[in-house]
Image (cartoon, coloured by chain):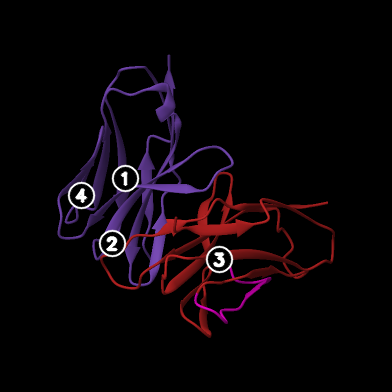
Amino acid sequence: DGGITQSPKYLFRKEGQNVTLSCEQNLNHDAMYWYRQDPGQGLRLIYYSQIVNDFQKGDIAEGYSVSREKKESFPLTVTSAQKNPTAFYLCASRTVGSGYGYTFGSGTRLTVV
Amino acid sequence: KQEVTQIPAALSVPEGENLVLNCSFTDSAIYNLQWFRQDPGKGLTSLLLIQSSQREQTSGRLNASLDKSSGRSTLYIAASQPGDSATYLCAVTSGSRLTFGEGTQLTVNP
């Protein structure tokens, strides 16, 4: 079955540590996205990529980095510069074009310890 | 900047009731509108996708309408069941962005 796989499901980060969240899709979608979800604030766009080797900042990119070396993969690194990283992170993908909807993964919950 | 609002923020109903969730958006220049369901601690499941040229979409007990000119959408759930309890999110696609509302938390009581 096609879909989006996010791993790990739970991740714990120590202060000052970088961590990488994995997102892989086998839907042959062109575009991939990272969102952050906090209680009471809805989903906010971190980064997105519409083509391999290219990506754009979203609304809250500070303290995060991404890469898009393969069409199937869009990993997100939460760096030590992100001061409040505890949140639920969701990856999404879609075919580029006005008629296509988004498919989401099951999420990674990141907690700072 | 696109803004999406969902009303009510929370809703509690007895099983079997028909209900309506509301979504409004500020910029009518959208490509499409998508309704999602989110269970606690889980990802988003797409329920319905309405293209900007369409007025409604139906899937089983769910019906979503879109009035682009007035910036409104409704999600109608018929004969609600306890398994429908979840958070329902409305999102609109404008350009390369998907903008979400904050959701309606639905509880269906047996």
Residue at 41% over, 49% down: B101
Task: Tell me the mark number nearer the camera, choosing from 2 and 1.
Answer: 1
Q: Which chain is red?
A: A
Q: Marks 4 and 1: CB-CB under 8 Å?
A: no
Disc on res. B66: 4
Shade representing chain B: purple
Residue type of the residue flagged with mark 2: Asp
Measure the alpha-carbon separation of dots 2 and 4.
13 Å
Residue A64 is covered by the magenta coloring: yes
Dominant SS type (magenta): loop
Q: Quadrant of residue A64?
A: bottom right
Please tell me how crowded label 1 is: few (under 14), some (14-19), or many (20+) other residues with Cα within 10 Å. many
Could you tell me residue A98's position as x and y percent? 27, 69
- Mark 4 vs mark 1: same chain? yes
Measure the alpha-carbon separation of dots 2 and 1.
13 Å
Q: Magenta residues?
A: A60-71
Task: Tell me the mark number nearer the camera, choosing from 1 and 3.
Answer: 3
Task: Tell me the mark number nearer the camera, choosing from 4 and 3.
Answer: 3
Pick whichever, A62 or B45, lies toward us. B45
- Mark 2 vs mark 1: same chain? yes
Task: Tell me the mark number nearer the camera, choosing from 4 and 1.
Answer: 4
Quadrant of the frame with the N terminus of chain A: bottom left
Residue at 42% over, 57% down: A103
Measure the alpha-carbon separation of dots 1 and 3.
31 Å
Q: Chain of mark 4?
A: B
Q: Residue at label 2?
A: B27
Instruction: Establish if B38 lies above or below A56.
Output: above
Could you tell me residue A61's position as x and y percent? 60, 71
Element type where label 2 sits in the image = loop
Residue type of the residue flagged with mark 4: Leu
